[in-house]
Amino acid sequence: MTITEHQDWLVDFYQRRNWYQYSPFVHLNFLTEETGEVSRAIRAIEIGRDHPGEKKATPEELRANLKEELADALDQVLVISSLYDIDAQDLLQASEQKLKQRFRGDMA
């Protein structure tokens, strides 16, 4: 599956759940929430969690949680870009183009 195919699937899924109609501003808040969850997942991997009531996760569980949270954050980026009619593939190209331009003197 390409990133554009995933974006198309995701938009269809969100439309079926009646989540797509929310404004980009609302989805930005969802992205902020997901970013916090990515932060928490990385913290758990890097320095651990010392929280009563939480069971100690295995390294495999910690990595799976990070993967899940990164995917959730990516999905919000893809939904926001779709709401502005920006194809996901264009995001990848824009990122690469910007970095190549910015660091063209450093590129071998």
Image (cartoon, rainbow, N blue to C red):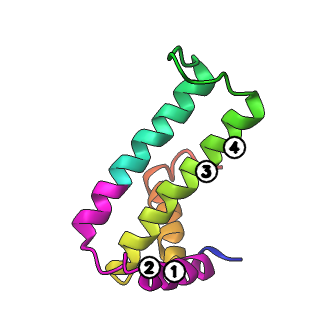
83 left or right of 54 in image:
left
Most common secondary structure along the magenta stretch: helix
Above or below, comparing residue 56 to residue 74 in the picture: above
Residue at 57 percent across and 16 percent down: it is 47
Q: Residues within 10 Å of mark 2 (few under 14, many from 20)?
A: few
C-alpha distance separating marks 1 and 3: 17 Å
Q: Judge left or right: residue 57 versus residue 75.
A: right
Q: Are marks 2 and 1 in contact (CB under 8 Å)?
A: yes
Q: Gap between marks 2 and 3, in whole Å?
A: 20 Å
Can residue 52 be spotted in the picture?
yes
Instruction: State how far apart marks 2 and 1 are (Cα).
Output: 6 Å
- Disc sitting over residue 13 in the figure: 1
Q: Which mark, residue 17?
A: 2
Label pair 3/4, CB-CB below 8 angstroms: yes
Confirm whether the magenta stretch covers residue 91: no
Mark 4 or mark 2, which has the lower sequence index? 2
The tag on residue 79 is: none
Q: Earlier in the sequence, mark 4 or mark 1?
A: 1
Position in image of residue 5 (x %, y %): 62, 82
First in sequence, mark 2 or 3: give its number. 2
- Viewer-side label of 2, 3: 2
Few, some or many residues within 10 Å of mark 1 (<14, 14–19, 20+): few
C-alpha span from label 4 to label 1: 23 Å
- What amino acid type is highlighted by mark number 2? Arg
Label 1 amino acid? Phe
Task: Identify the magenta region.
Answer: 4-30
SS at mark 4 in the image? helix
What residue did someone put label 3 on?
68
At horizontal 51% and vertical 80% (from top left) the residue drawn is 13
Q: Pointer 4: what residue?
A: 64
Q: Is residue 24 magenta?
A: yes
Mark 4 residue crowding within 10 angstroms, few (<14) / some (14–19) / many (20+) = few
